[in-house]
């Protein structure tokens, strides 16, 4: 039997407790930036049975209605009375202003904190993303669409997916080994109905859209516990920032540890992670590598990154040290440069949309960090 290597990624639905928290955090950010582009926001959310706590630091010139934001988002996600969590929950607002000590470093153009950020790209899909995450995400996107349209009348908002791919020793994908989907459901739904609907209406169309044969998948696990009625924040508490791997590359590339949601662009946890993706995608898009990971690091109050590292995993066609130097010249990786070039305060997109289905590799949104607009500049800088 051929020796294979297995890699797995997961995704969660907008109704997952942690994703509810992320979306509320980013909805608060959107409300601030919409009316005051210079808003400073660090918003954290805690969700549990019948209760949402909103805390953190916000400095803005606009008024935001926390109660309305929370209730509107819960209603949009699809929680209704009888699920143990709905728009009539209690809402506790514990927000105060940003520390002036932090503001000192940001006001002069420096980073809002120290930290390390990673971004990556790989030629496994047209969007230059890892296939396992792309499939897991596509399953959740389709499942959510069918749930909200009412086609899956038995389904409730909370769900998870997981996809395991098999690779040969050359690093080539040879097939899908396992697909796992867990969906919250109404009490009266039978497991047979759930299995048939999820496999036939959700998983199979997704796999076929990527030219994969559903009949060749070795293992399907659909609601493997046999029952998933109690879900959402009633079944498990939700916190902002606990799904950072789902938000990015599904574990295919490294992660610096900083979450995105609820943070304005002065926080390099968010903005520099987007920038690192932008850099890596343009490197792969320029055919300088088939797989690339970029690490950036920052010091609080300092504008320029303290380091830039490029890793091409043996797939590169250019010296990595030289490539890192060129990146520093082609891209403005200061916080203000990133905010400007990636339009992070423009209001051209809603951050809460990113909190639902991922921040990286999106094809349904025109996100500046997904554009291949630095390919020519990279090649020229390298004399290619």
Image (cartoon, grey):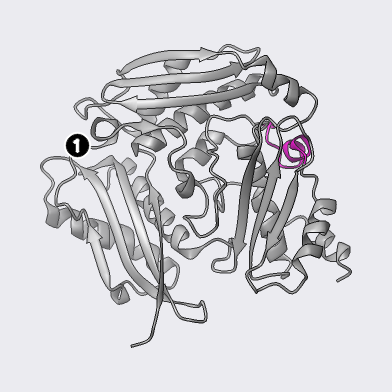
Quadrant that contains the C terminus: bottom right
Q: Position of residue 108 (x, y in %)?
A: 80, 25
Q: Which residue is mark 1?
A: 230
Q: Position of residue 378 (x, y in %)?
A: 81, 61
* Residue shown at 66% from the left, 12% from the top: 61
Whether 337 is among the magenta residues is yes
Left or right of 19: which side holds 202? left
* Residue shown at 38% from the left, 31% from the top: 76
Viewer can see residue 367: no
Part of the protein shown in magenta: 334-346
Helix, strand or loop at disc 1?
loop
Viewer can see residue 229: yes
Whether 228 is among the magenta residues is no
The answer to whether residue 346 is above or below residue 182 is above
* Residue shown at 75% from the left, 43% from the top: 305
Left or right of 229: which side holds 306? right
Q: Position of residue 367 (x, y in %)?
A: 63, 46
Q: Position of residue 112 (x, y in %)?
A: 68, 30
- At label 1, counting other C-alpha atoms closer than 10 Å, the crowd grade (few under 14, some 14-19, many 20 or more) is some
* Residue shown at 48% from the left, 81% from the top: 169
The answer to whether residue 119 is above or below residue 342 is below
The answer to whether residue 231 is above or below residue 35 is below
């Amino acid at each position: 039997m051929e020796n294979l290597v297995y890699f797995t990624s997961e995704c969660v639905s907008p109704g997952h407790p942690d994703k509810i928290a992320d979306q509320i955090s980013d909805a608060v950010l959107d409300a601030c930036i919409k009316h005051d582009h210079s808003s400073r926001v660090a918003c954290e959310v805690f969700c549990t049975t019948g209760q949402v706590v909103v805390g953190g630091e916000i400095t803005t010139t606009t008024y935001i209605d926390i109660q309305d934001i929370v209730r509107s988002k819960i209603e949009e996600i699809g929680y209704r009375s009888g699920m143990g969590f709905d728009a009539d929950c209690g809402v506790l607002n514990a927000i105060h202003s940003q520390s002036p000590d932090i503001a000192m470093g940001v006001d002069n153009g420096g980073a809002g904190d120290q930290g390390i950020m990673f971004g990556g790209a790989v030629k496994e899909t047209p969007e230059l993303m890892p296939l396992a995450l792309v499939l897991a995400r596509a399953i959740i996107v389709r499942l959510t669409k069918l749930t909200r349209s009412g086609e899956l009348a038995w389904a409730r908002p909370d769900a998870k997916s997981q996809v395991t791919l098999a690779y040969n020793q050359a690093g080539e994908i040879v097939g899908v080994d396992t697909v796992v989907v867990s969906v919250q459901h109404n009490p009266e739904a039978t497991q047979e109905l759930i299995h048939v609907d999820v496999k036939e209406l959700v998983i199979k169309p997704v796999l076929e859209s990527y030219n994969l044969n559903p009949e060749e998948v070795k293992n399907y696990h659909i609601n493997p516990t046999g029952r998933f009625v109690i879900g959402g924040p009633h079944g498990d508490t939700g916190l902002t920032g606990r799904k950072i791997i789902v938000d990015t590359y599904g574990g295919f590339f490294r992660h610096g540890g900083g979450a995105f949601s609820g943070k304005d662009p002065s926080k390099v946890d968010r903005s520099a992670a987007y920038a690192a993706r932008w850099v890596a995608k343009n490197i792969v898009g320029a055919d300088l590598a088939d797989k690339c990971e970029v690490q950036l690091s920052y010091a609080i109050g300092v504008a320029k990154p303290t380091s830039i590292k490029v890793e091409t995993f043996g797939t590169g066609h250019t010296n990595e040290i030289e490539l890192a130097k060129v990146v520093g010249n082609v891209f403005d990786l200061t916080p203000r440069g990133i905010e400007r070039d990636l339009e992070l305060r423009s209001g051209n997109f809603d951050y809460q949309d990113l909190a639902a289905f991922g921040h990286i590799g999106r094809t349904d949104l025109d996100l500046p960090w997904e554009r291949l607009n630095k390919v020519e500049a990279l090649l020229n800088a390298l004399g290619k």
